[in-house]
Amino acid sequence: MATEITPSLTLALFCKVVDNYGDIGICWRLARQLRHEHGVAVTLWVDDLQTFQRICPEVDTGAPLQQVAGVAVQHWAGQDGGFTPADVADIVIEFFGCDIPPGYIAAMAQCEPRPVWLNLEGLTAEEWVEGCHTLPSSHPRLPLTKHFFFPGFTAKTGGLLRESALEGQRQAFLSDAAAMAEFLARFGVTPAELASLKVSLFCYPHAPVAELFSAWAQGGEPVLCLVPEGVAADAVQAFLGATPAAGAVRSSGALTVRVLPFVPQQDYDKLLWACDLNFVRGEDSVVRAQWAGKPFVWHIYPQDENLHHKKLGAFLQRYADPAGQAAGALDAFSLRWNGALPPGADNGPDAAAEWRALWPALQAVMPAAASRAAEWQQQITAHGDLATNLLRFAASLK
Ligand code: TRH
C-alpha cells in the first residue's frame, strides 16, 4: 500500500560501499522502490560505481550524475564541496552510519523546515533492535536531530524491503514451468538437470564449500549447484579443475556444478525462486531468500569476536519451526556452515565425514523446511515493507 506523500517529496540516500555488494544492493532496491511505488524524487549518492554496475549493468561508471531507472545517481566522490539549503532533500538517509559530507550537514541545519534525517541501520534479529528503532540523536553542535531506523523481523522494527509486485511476480514465475526452464537454460541448464535438486550458492570465501561438494558428490540424490562467477572461487576452481569462468561446468558423482555470470539484481530473485535450496549471505540476499519462500542456509557476514554467531543464533531462534520438524537439522547445518558449533558439540576430527552426515540430515527434512519457509514468508509479510514504513515514520516527524 502506498503512503500519502507530497508529490514533490525529495530524498537523498547516501551509500558508502564498504566491501561486497550488500550496501549498494540494499540502497539500490530501496531507491527504486521509493521512486516507483511512492513517487519520491530520489538521489542516490554512491561512492563506488564499479560495484554498483555489477548488480545494475546500466550504470555508467564514468558519469558524475546520471538517471538510472528514474533515480538520480550521484557519484559521491568525496567529503568536500559546498552545499546550500536548496541542495538539501526533504528526507536525508545515511545508510549504515556513513558520514555524509560536512557541508551537506551544515546546509541541512540552515533549512527551514529542517529535513528529516535518518540513519538506516543494518539488519539483525536480536531483540535490542526493538528498543533502539526510531530513537532520536541530537547533533552535538547544530540544531539537527537524526533518528535511527532499523530493519527487522517484528512489528516493532522497520520491517524488510519488499516491492509490492514481488509476490505476484514470484507466483507467476513459479506457475510457468516453461519460463523457469527457459530462464535456467540461459545458464546452460539442460532439461535433464531440471530433475536434480537445484541449489544456488552465494557465500563468503571461508565457507566449507569443498566439504559440501564432496558430500553432494557422494550423496544418493543428483544435485545441480548454480554458483555465480567469483563466489567460492577456490573451491569451485578445485572442483572444476579449471578457472571458474561463467559457463564452466563439471559433474562428479551425484553433483554437477555450473558457473553462472554474476546476474543483475532482478534476475537474482528468479534464480532463488527457481532453486529448491538457496545458500545466501550478508543482508540483502538472505532477505530475498526469505521472500523466495524456499529453504535457505545463511552465511552471515563475519564480525570480530564471533559477534556474528550471536546474530545467527538470534535469527535461527526466531525462524525455528514451532512444530520443530526442520529446525534441528537446519540449525545444525547453518551453525556449522558458519563455523559455529551446535550446543554441546565439539569439533570432530574429520570435517569431510561431518558434512557427509550433515547433508543427509538436512536433506531428510527438506519437505518440512519448505513448509516452514512458506509459513515464515507469510509471517514477515504481516509487518509491512521497509520503504512504506520508513516514509510513514518520516511523515510522523514533520
Ligand atoms: O555482498 P554481501 O556480502 O554484502 C554484505 C552485507 O550486506 C553485510 O551486511 C555488509 O555489512 C557487508 O556486505 C559489507 O551480501 P548481500 O547483502 O547479500 O548483497 C549481495 C547483493 O548482490 C544482493 O543485492 C544480491 C546481489 N546479487 C546479484 O545481483 N547478482 C548475483 O549474481 C548475486 C550472487 C548477488
Image (tube, rainbow, N blue to C red):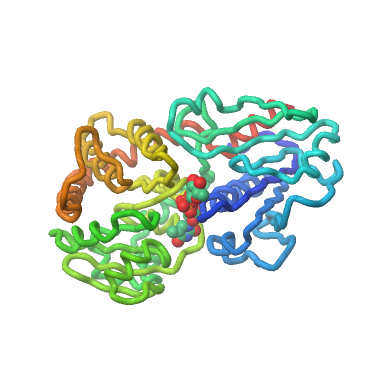
Left or right of 110 on screen, residue 340: left
On screen, residue 352 versus residue 95, left or right, reads left
Q: Which residue is at a point 18% across and 65% down the rendered structure image?
A: 254
Q: Which is more toward the observer, 360 or 10?
A: 360
| Quadrant assignment for the C terminus | top right
Q: Residue furthest bottom?
A: 242
Q: Is residue 199 left or right of residue 129?
A: left
Left or right: 24, with 71 as reference point: left
Q: Position of residue 229 (x, y in %)?
A: 42, 67
Q: Nearer the viewer, residue 393 or 280?
A: 280
Q: Position of residue 371 (x, y in %)?
A: 28, 40
The residue located at (43%, 35%) in the rendering is 380
In this rendering, does residue 175 appear at all?
no
Image location (x, y in percent) of residue 236 = 32, 67
Q: Residue at x 23, y 38 (%)?
A: 326
**Residue at figure coordinates x 33%, y 31% from the top left:** 317
Total labels drawn: 0
Residue 85 visible, this orientation? yes
Image x and y of residue 240, in percent: 29, 73
The residue lying furthest to the left in this view is 220
In this view, the residue in front, 228 or 349, is: 349
Q: Is residue 29 above or below residue 310?
A: below
